[in-house]
Amino acid sequence: MRDEVKAALEAVLFVRGEAVGLDELVELLDVPLLDLKVIMDELLIEYNNNHRGVQIIMMAGPAYLMCTHPDCSDILSRMERPVRRRLSQASLETLAVIAYRQPVTRAEIEKIRGVKCDKVITSLLERNLIEEAGTKAVAGKPMQYITSEGFLRVFGLTSLKDLPELEEA
C-alpha cells in the first residue's frame, strides 16, 4: 500500500504543478493524516537525497510542491520556452509594497508609491502574483490584496519569512 500512496502523491504533485496542502492530500488519497505525513517524509527523502532532476519541497501550510532541482537550471535555461514578459518597474514596486505590507488596499499602495496603480494591480492579479483578500472594515470597504502562492513560486520562496529584511529609508 505504501508504494501505491507514494505513486499517487507523485502523480498529484506532478499534475497540479503548484503546492498541494496536506489536508487536501489526506482527502484525495483517503489516507490518515499521521500515515500520510510519514509517507510524505519518506518521499521527500527519496527525492531530495538521490540527486534527481526534480525535487519535492515542503512549503508553509504545510503544503508540498514538485519542481525542478536548482542544479538543473543551466540545462533548463538552454531549452526553448515561451517568452515570458518581464515585470515592469511599476509592477515590481507595487508587488514589493504588497509583499511587505499585506494585506493592503489600492489606496494604501498609491499613497506609498505616489501614483495610480489600477492597471498594475490588474496585471499582477492576471499573472497570479497577488490575490484579493477580502475588504477592509472602513468606509467604502476597499479590497485588500496579498501575495499568492504564485508569487512565492516565481521568486523561489517557501514562505514570506524568506523575504529579505526591509531596509529603512
Image (tube, rainbow, N blue to C red):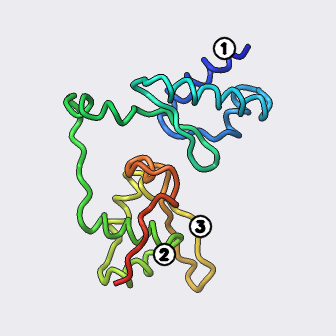
- In front of the other: label 1 or label 3? 1
Residue 36 coordinates in the image, percent (x, y): 72, 30
Q: Is residue 141 above or below residue 78?
A: below
Q: Please state which of residues 31 and 75 is positioned toward the viewer in this rendering.
A: 75
Residue 128 coordinates in the image, percent (x, y): 42, 51
At x 77%, y 28%, the residue is 35
- Place residue 165 in its image quadrant: bottom left
SS of the residue at dot 1? helix
Q: What residue is shown with label 2?
A: 105
On screen, residue 112 versus residue 146, left or right, reads: left
Q: Please state which of residues 60 and 127 is positioned toward the viewer in this rendering.
A: 60
Q: What residue is shown with label 3?
A: 134
Give the residue type that dot 3 points to: Gly
Q: Mark 1 and mark 3: span between their CA atoms?
A: 42 Å
Dot placed on the residue nearer the N-terminal end, 2 or 1: 1
Give the residue type that dot 2 points to: Thr
Q: Quadrant of the C terminus?
A: bottom left
SS of the residue at dot 3? strand
- In front of the other: label 2 or label 1? 1
Q: Please state which of residues 88 and 32 is positioned toward the viewer in this rendering.
A: 32
- Place residue 125 in its image quadrant: bottom left
Q: What residue is shown with label 1?
A: 3
Dot placed on the residue nearer the N-terminal end, 2 or 3: 2
At x 67%, y 33%, the residue is 25
